[in-house]
Amino acid sequence: MKRKTRTSLIICAVMAAVTALLMLLPDGYLNPFSRIPREQVRIDAVDNSALMPIGIVYSGVQACQVTVLTGQHQGQTGAGSNYLNSALDKDKLFVPGDVAYAMVQGADDNLQVTLIDHYRAGSELWILGALAIALILFGGMIGAGALVSLVASAVIIWKLLVPLLLDQVNPIFASLVTVLVLTAIIDVLVAGFTRRCAVAFLGSLAGTVTTFLLALLLTDVLRLDGGDIPYVVPLLSQASLSVDTRGLFIGMMFIANSGALMDLSMDVSVACEEVQRHCPDITAPALLKSGLTVGRGVLGTMATTLMLAYSGNYLSMLMYFAGQGTPVLDILNLKYVSSQLLNTLVGSFGLVATAPLSALAASLLYPRKQGVTPAMPSPAEKRIG
């Protein structure tokens, strides 16, 4: 057990170091506005006289008096501008006492402050810290591995996958490789270099390949081109219409479902390992049957989990359709609804492939222990029988 813990600690430390090095990679798409210093500022006073209400949104500029809280201009006051564009999902209004995140430039006696949004990074770090403590207290080294894998996944996507996509690398290939790499990293961080890890990886691999092939096929069947993915219009404008939206949609599909596949394969792997540990003389067919039983039980909830995850994200859209009396058949034929429905169905097919193949891998990789034979009944037990 000590050797296992030491190995897990080494793996976590190595992956944490690699993640830290990846975070040091420079961002290749910075512009002059990106280089303007960002600081925290406190809102001291606001002037809403230049705002024009348009329904429930506003257009214009909210003038603010602010005090800079961080950086070389700390403690200085200046005039801030909050630009509103009649967009409810992006606009914000400040009140005195708010702490905002802003671009600060200019001389000490003439600061120019452009307000970006409310400052939330501090609270987000506290929440992440609370999650880290909970994971480590409950999961020990496995929890620490889960925490490192969470951070590593975010960094790999931001520092490696996103730049590759912006450099117009095939989005399907780049996303598939990213999913496979993340699956291997996460399984190793959680289970170490063990049979448990190998079983989980093979099961996830089977589900990922299934998801990949079905995404390629069914996207054409439903005539989906990725035109409804978030921010696709400004992305196309930024990239001079050179983004493969269909390929990006497919890549997003199996990235979104990869977590559920990893969950299911690891569930089956851990369950089969425990069965084999408590019953070392179990045969491969019996272990396969146990794995299939576990897989069926988990599959019943995991498929529903995908549906609830996507419907939860689009609950407001469903409310809108229901409120205006849109027929269900009309809803099912809309492009953006079909996209999310396909996402859920393809992920569910991946789960159906992952469960039995994880059980099969477990039955092959968790061998019967050498020198252990089934216990023979005693003469007394034979007589009782």
Image (tube, helix red, strand yellow):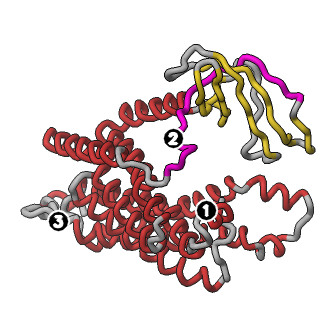
- Residue 81, quarter of the rendered image: top right
Task: Look at the numbered disc 1 and give the secondary structure of its residue.
Answer: helix
Residue type, mark 1 in image: Gln
Packing grade of label 3 (10 A; few <14, some 14-19, many >=20) is some
The residue that mark 3 highlights is 368
Q: Which residues are magenta?
A: 30-49
Report the residue at 54% width, 17% height from top: 74
| Residue at the top extreme, as displayed | 75
Pick whichever, 173 or 232, lies toward us. 232
Residue type, mark 2 in image: Arg
- Residue 160, quarter of the rendered image: bottom left
Give coordinates of residue 5: x percent, y percent. 20, 40
Give coordinates of residue 52: x percent, y percent. 90, 38
Give coordinates of residue 304: x percent, y percent. 60, 61
The residue that mark 2 highlights is 35
* Camera sees residue 259: yes
